[in-house]
Image (spheres, rainbow, N blue to C red):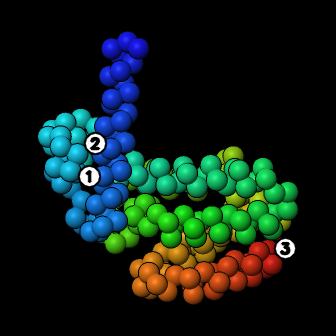
Amino acid sequence: MGIVERRERLRIQVRSDIVKTAKDIAREDGWTAVSIRKIADVIEYSPPILYEYFESKDKLLEAIRMEGFDYLQTEFVKIKGHFSNPQKQLVEVAQTIWHFAVENPEVFQVMFNLEGAYCDSKKAYSQAMSIKDNPVWEMIASLRPKSGELVTKTYYEWWCLTFGFISITMTTQPRYAFPQAEPVYMEGIRRFIRSIM
């Protein structure tokens, strides 16, 4: 392996370490405890080195937000390919979002500016909400193939229901209450799906 490849591999590894450390600190102490300096202390690099990867905490949070939406998008594509029934697809999508939020609360917090994880960037939202090649929009269109405008309106409602319910649950309920909240969430999802058919 050449020097250039080795440097690139090291660069990818350091970037990954920065992101992982930020998430670890946030999971343990909350996003307000995360700073470039604290991350640098944990991974034993100087802050100026970290600024070569992320020029600010906001840029770091933007990368984590994009990571969360990209992960979910990949899962939605898999679901669309695995199940042919659009009702089943949407139920699976809803469960995937729920489990992702429960298992990765620190990432979900960044995705929706919760619990002190404030990020100015709207780039991830515009990509996630875009209807072009959007598997969830296509699932809804299969159930409600009337007009693109109506499907888009329903897709926006879906977004509000799924991500809104989880965000409210995460910010108002103690963690031990999540198992009781999941059936309420899923019943709301099923009711929503029935209403659009």
Q: Are marks 2 and 1 in contact (CB under 8 Å)?
A: yes
User: In the displayed structure, would residue 165 be above or below residue 113?
Assistant: below
Residue at x 60%, y 81% (from the top left corner) = 182
- Left or right of residue 134, residue 173 in this image: left
In this rendering, the label closer to the viewer, 3 or 1: 1
Is 128 in front, or is 94? 94
First reached walking from the N terminus: tag 3 or tag 2: 2
Return the residue at label 2: 54
The amino acid sitting under disc 1 is Lys
Return the residue at label 3: 197
Label 2 packing within 10 angstroms: few (<14), some (14-19), many (20+): some
In this rendering, the label closer to the viewer, 3 or 2: 2
The amino acid sitting under disc 2 is Phe
Q: Point out the image quarter for the C terminus.
A: bottom right
Residue at x 73%, y 55% (from the top left corner) = 79
Can residue 24 be seen at all in this image of the molecule? yes
State the image coordinates of residue 73 (x, y, percent, origin top left): 61, 52
Is 184 in front, or is 142? 184
Return the residue at label 1: 57
Is 16 in front, or is 97? 16
Residue at x 69%, y 50% (from the top left corner) = 77
